[in-house]
Amino acid sequence: MANLGFVFALIGAAAAALFAGMGSSIGVGRAGQAAAGVVAEDGSQFSKVLILQLLPGTQGIYGLLIAFITMSQIGVLGGSADMSLAKGLAYFAACLPIAFVGLVSGMAQGNASVAAIGLVAKDPSQFGKAMIFPAMVETYAILALLVSILAIFAIPGLTI
């Protein structure tokens, strides 16, 4: 019971990596299926569709970043892992934005990438425009990453 705060903080870090990683893996997988179809028909489009496939992978990276930052702040990567329940819950809450937005935006970005890959398959000259569609979804993952980072770095100064 004495380390319950630490447990909640660690669950938050795990949730950030887990859910954002799940969203990315689903999104990259969907886009990969579409990309493979395009490359089967026209191998010269490989580099274009690969870039579009990789875009949904960033949410998993963001979740992993938040997990590492949280673990370094709570003492997993050195220092003391002793903290109050309130502080542990604060870390848990700080990890939630990228956990949930990463999950949903990774899947949504995968869907947008599938559509963009279809566009490139029909007209390779539209690659630049096609990249805009999945990139717009990325905006919300970046906003969630920013909220999580700001919240995590605000916690050590809290008196709870």
Image (spheres, grey):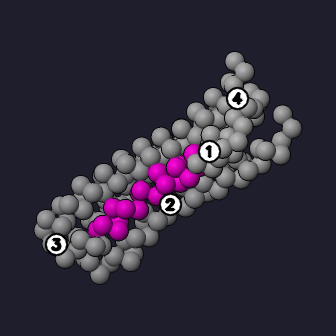
For label 3, the residue is 43
* Residue 5 magenta-highlighted: no
For label 4, the residue is 5
Picture disc at residue 138: 2
N-term-proximal mark, 4 vs 3? 4
For label 1, the residue is 77
Q: Nearer the viewer, mark 1 or mark 2?
A: 1
Q: Is residue 142 found left or right of 160 in the rendered image?
A: left
Write the residue at 83% across / 46% down. 157
Q: Amino acid at mark 4?
A: Gly
Q: Nearer the viewer, mark 3 or mark 1?
A: 1
The answer to whether mark 1 and mark 2 are in CB contact below 8 A is no
The answer to whether mark 3 and mark 2 are in CB contact below 8 A is no
Marks counted in the figure total 4
Residue 43 x %, y %: 16, 72
Q: Nearer the viewer, mark 2 or mark 4?
A: 4
Q: Amino acid at mark 1?
A: Leu
Q: Amino acid at mark 2?
A: Glu
| Residue 96 shows in this picture | no
The chief SS type of the magenta part is helix
Q: Is residue 123 found left or right of 111 in the rendered image?
A: left
Distance in Å between CA atoms under marks 1 and 2: 29 Å
